[in-house]
């Protein structure tokens, strides 16, 4: 028994070294430019809005606002004046209620009252607004048009508070997404976070980013769009069982037990 414990104790230093988590691996936004062989792989973002393209299964809140309630009723899913529209937007968090939104179908179209099928897939929100303005100004003299994405969300899995989270904007930074979800666990691979993004062709692309690199901030690669999936892998210590349940108390107990047996 004592020989067995001696063998176990010989492996304790390696065990402790393997299970330790370096503070440097958990710190966000580090300046790595002085590190040997460092290369900045991130592209500075020149435009921080209007990058997201409308895709299949998205929901668009579109409302024609005019003082003429009969005209408003003709062009909207539900009748109402501009004041009623503004009130509904406030009640639904500014993104538009899903029940008053238009689903983008498999053909990339929405079915709009009085206009029929309108192609919106592949356009930004501003481009959709411009397209509808061009159509409607031929039919209405005075109106205001509201176009918003509704029911926008991102999903996070792995070493984080996994779940599906709503977005208040068309795009947010990866750091905002992490904050919304409640941060990553200490056992996360912050240097190898994967962003899985659906494309117009139906095939998802995968990007790997390093959250500890300061150059990621405000880069093209740092933004999260609706329907993105963020996957955070666990570090090796967690994979091999040295997670939340691992404690130095176990090591202390083994040493105490060994010393006790040695006295006999």
Image (spheres, grey):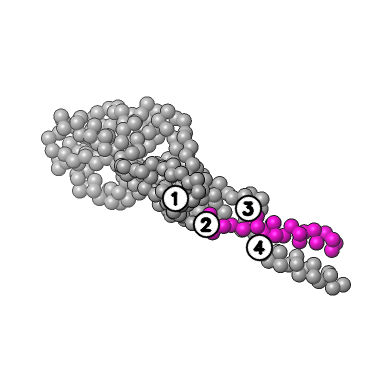
- The answer for how far apart the CA atoms under marks 1 and 4 are is 35 Å
Where does residue 161 sit, x and y in percent of width and height?
Answer: 51, 52
For disc 2, the neighbor class at 10 Å (few under 14, some 14 to 19, many from 20) is: few
Quadrant placement of the C terminus: bottom right
Q: Identify the disc placed on residue 24.
A: 2
Q: Answer with left or right where residue 231 lies relative to residue 259.
A: left
Question: Which residue has dot 1 on it?
Answer: 33
Q: Nearer the viewer, mark 2 or mark 4?
A: 2
Q: Nearer the viewer, mark 1 or mark 4?
A: 1
Secondary structure found at label 2: helix
Question: Which residue has dot 3 on it?
Answer: 237
Q: Identify the disc placed on residue 247.
A: 4
The mark that comes first in sequence, 2 or 4, is: 2
Q: Nearer the viewer, residue 163 or 193?
A: 193
- The answer for how far apart the CA atoms under marks 3 and 2 are is 16 Å
Asked if labels 1 and 3 touch by Cβ distance under 8 angstroms, the answer is no
Which residue reaches farthest left? 141
Q: Residue at x 44, y 42 (%)?
A: 41
The mark that comes first in sequence, 1 or 4, is: 1
Q: Answer with left or right where residue 71 lies relative to residue 169.
A: left
- The answer for how far apart the CA atoms under marks 3 and 1 are is 28 Å
Secondary structure found at label 1: loop
Asked if labels 4 and 2 touch by Cβ distance under 8 angstroms, the answer is no
Where does residue 136 sit, x and y in percent of width and height?
Answer: 19, 32
Q: Residue at x 41, y 43 (%)?
A: 42
Asked if labels 2 and 1 touch by Cβ distance under 8 angstroms, the answer is no
- The answer for how far apart the CA atoms under marks 1 and 2 are is 15 Å
Magenta span of residues: 1-26
Q: Is residue 8 magenta?
A: yes
């Amino acid at each position: 028994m004592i020989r067995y414990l001696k063998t176990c104790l010989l492996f304790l230093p390696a065990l402790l070294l393997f299970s330790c988590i370096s503070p440097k691996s958990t710190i966000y936004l580090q300046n790595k430019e002085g590190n040997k062989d460092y290369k900045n792989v991130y592209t500075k973002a020149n435009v921080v809005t209007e990058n997201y393209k409308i895709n299949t299964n998205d929901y668009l809140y579109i409302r024609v606002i005019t003082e003429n309630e009969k005209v408003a009723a003709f062009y909207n899913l539900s009748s109402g004046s501009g004041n009623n529209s503004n009130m509904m937007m406030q009640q639904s968090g500014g993104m538009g209620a899903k029940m008053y939104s238009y689903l983008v179908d498999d053909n990339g179209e929405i079915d709009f009252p009085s206009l029929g099928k309108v192609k919106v897939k592949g356009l930004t929100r501003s481009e959709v607004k411009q397209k509808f303005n061009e159509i409607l100004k031929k039919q209405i003299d005075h109106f205001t048009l509201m176009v918003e994405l509704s029911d926008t969300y991102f999903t996070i899995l792995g070493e984080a508070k996994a779940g599906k989270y709503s977005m208040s904007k068309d795009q947010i930074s990866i750091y905002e997404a992490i904050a919304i979800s409640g941060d990553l666990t200490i056992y996360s691979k912050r240097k190898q976070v994967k962003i899985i993004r659906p494309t117009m062709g139906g095939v998802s692309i995968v990007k790997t980013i390093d959250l500890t690199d300061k150059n990621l901030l405000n880069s093209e690669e740092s933004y999260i769009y609706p329907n993105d999936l963020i996957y955070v892998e666990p570090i090796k210590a967690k994979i091999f069982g040295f997670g939340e349940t691992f404690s130095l108390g176990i090591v202390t107990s083994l040493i105490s037990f060994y010393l006790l047996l040695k006295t006999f």
